[in-house]
Amino acid sequence: MKYTNRVLGLLLALLLAFGTAAGASASMQAPAGVAQLAAAPAAVAKQTTANLNLRKSPSVHSASLLVIPKGAKVLVSGGSSGWVQATYKKKSGWVSAKYLTSPAAPAKPKSSATRYLLSFQPVRKKATSVSPALAGAMRKAKVQRLGATGSWSRIKIGKVTGFVPTSQLSSSLPAPVHRYSKSAQVLRKSTSAKAARVASVPAGAKVEWLRTSGSWSYVATAGKRGWLPAKQLSTQPVATQKTIGSRWLLSSSVLRRSNHSSSASLGRLAPGEKVGLYTTRGSWSQIKSTRGIGWVPTAILSSTAYKPAHPAPRWILSSTAVRASASGTSRSLGTVAAGSTLTLHGTSNGWARVKTSKTTGWVPSSALVAKAYTPLKAAKRWTTANVHLRSGYSTGYKSLAVISKGQQVSILGTANGWARVSTTKGTGWIGNGYLATSKPQAPRPAPAPTTEYRWTTANVNLRAGAGVSHRSKAVLPAGQKVTFMRSDAGWAEVSAPQGRGWVRETYLSKSQPGVLQPDAQRVIAALKGRTGDTVSAIHTIRSGSSGHSSGKAVDLMIRDYKNRARVAQGDKLAQFLLDNRIQLGIYYLIWQDRIWLPTTGWTPYSDSGKYGSQFTGNWNDTTRHMDHIHVEVYGNAATKGPLDYRALSAR
């Protein structure tokens, strides 16, 4: 009995050690012997493959102690006929062995991978750009990549773990990015010109760029790191020597790193670009350009400003030498005959760069025309009327002189319906229609003309010829009496005390206008020298208006009147006139389709139905006074007091 008690005690201790209970069926079994107890299997962990009843005995008819959920871990020990003893949540019983499996081995943690940052990045708390930054990681920083979430990677750098964009990670160390200091600079501790000094950076120094923040760049140089102004850094090497002069490119060219054609390209330069010259070595020149500092062939550089042109045909007027450069003393490359066709590539200082059938060089720009030119041997011709000798083959060219009717000239060639002629007043162009192959008959004497007079209706230019392209010889004041000579295409030739010349006929009247009243004269005098270029013209006496015809009205014409800035300047002039209406004797103003009267102030003009009835059906920018300020005065009512100019000086 003593021996049996010891075995039962040992069995109970083992069961308690595995956390199991004997179960109802087990308590009914006879105690096992020592040899049988030693052979019992040890408890092992299993995992359920379905929701499973923990039963009181190994039978589906046995009572269920509880339901073990699918995937739960249980401890099993021993079995019989497809059933095993199991313990779950301190409950012991029997379960079907076919619903148990060995638990999967725990997944081994993925090993981290080394990566390098391609740019400065904030390390985010979460995988989104709006997440707070835990720290900042510099370009080329070495990090451990722990995993990925969408387009973000989870990394560890130092003691910080967070997220950065996957696109900014590289499996290899990025190559350094270099910049060059344009001038001597101070390396600062932070992005401020007042920040502590880290080191000095000489002009032309090569630094490693790490990041940019605003207008500053973070760089490494000579073992130190700090901030430099970004605008003082160049992507190309910077020469520290000064240029010795300016040059212009004659043609497109590759900028080379050194002075030979097989050297690396730094980019292509466009013709006409202005560059700085550093030095010339053999057939190459070192220059400073928009692509940086490099070398180009010396032959494509011009010492004078060069304006490139799209290749276009030109014709030579006379036999001309083609020069190696834009100078009459440079080497001759050959001669082109009159009438030859050339290709124009650009111009410089009165010279044209052209390509002939044999070479490329320079000829005087004056020797070329843009129309097909047929040279002729000097043949006699006679003018059939008083005609302009022009600098080119159209009326758009300036007049060099007036050749009188019947004068003999020598014709040198023709182009565009015009003849190039040699005259006693020089060489130029006359329309073919004004030349005859025989000397015209002398005209019969004309009867003495009756003297006619005209009067100017505004201040107007007296020009040297019939057109605005002719120079102004003088300005005739409004109301000036002139002698009328003749009319030509809307222009009148007149004789005035200031000389003889041409005036546009729209500024002339056949009747003597009224006298400009004192108040109108005071308005003009008050504005003299104070309108800048806002007022393009001042009109006073003319017919068609009681105010103008009586000398009581002044029109201030506003230049570029549709421009907002010009309208604002016109507003200032109108305010100045109102501020001084008592001193100047002003009755009313019209401006920008509004009228100012002493009794009403500013009110609508054309839309009112009260004013401008004479313009009904003919309203436009002029009749609505959008392009000028109309000033109406009393006549001679000004107080002549000091003027208030504050409106004109206001900003």
Image (cartoon, rainbow, N blue to C red):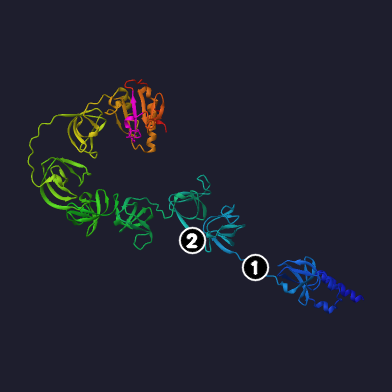
Assess disc 2: are there few (<14), some (14-19) or many (≥20) residues with their C-alpha within 10 Å of its C-alpha: few
Task: Say which of marks 2 and 1 sits in front.
Answer: 1
User: Which is nearer the eye, 628 or 334?
Assistant: 628
The numbered dot on residue 175 is 2
For the point 15% across and 53% down, the residue is 375
- What is the chief secondary structure element of the magenta stretch? loop
Instruction: Left or right? Give the position of 396 relative to 382.
Output: right
Instruction: Left or right? Give the position of 257 relative to 353.
Output: right
Q: Is residue 85 above or below residue 610?
A: below
Give the mark nearer the N terminus: 2 vs 1.
Answer: 1
Which quadrant of the view contains residue 67?
A: bottom right
User: Looking at this rendering, what residue extends furthest in the right direction?
Assistant: 1
The numbered dot on residue 108 is 1
Give the x, y percent position of residue 340.
Answer: 19, 56
Give the x, y percent position of residue 342.
Answer: 22, 56
Residue 365 visible in rendering: yes
Amino acid found under the numbered disc labelled 1: Lys
Give the x, y percent position of residue 227.
Answer: 50, 50
User: Which is nearer the eye, 268 or 105?
Assistant: 105
Which quadrant of the view contains residue 487?
A: top left
Which quadrant of the view contains residue 81?
A: bottom right
For the magenta stretch, what is the residue range? 611-633
CB under 8 Å between callouts 2 and 1? no
Distance of mark 2 from mark 1, alpha carbons? 35 Å
Give the x, y percent position of residue 224.
Answer: 52, 54
Instruction: Left or right? Give the position of 439 relative to 41.
Output: left
The numbered dot on residue 475 is none
The total of numbered circles placed on residues is: 2
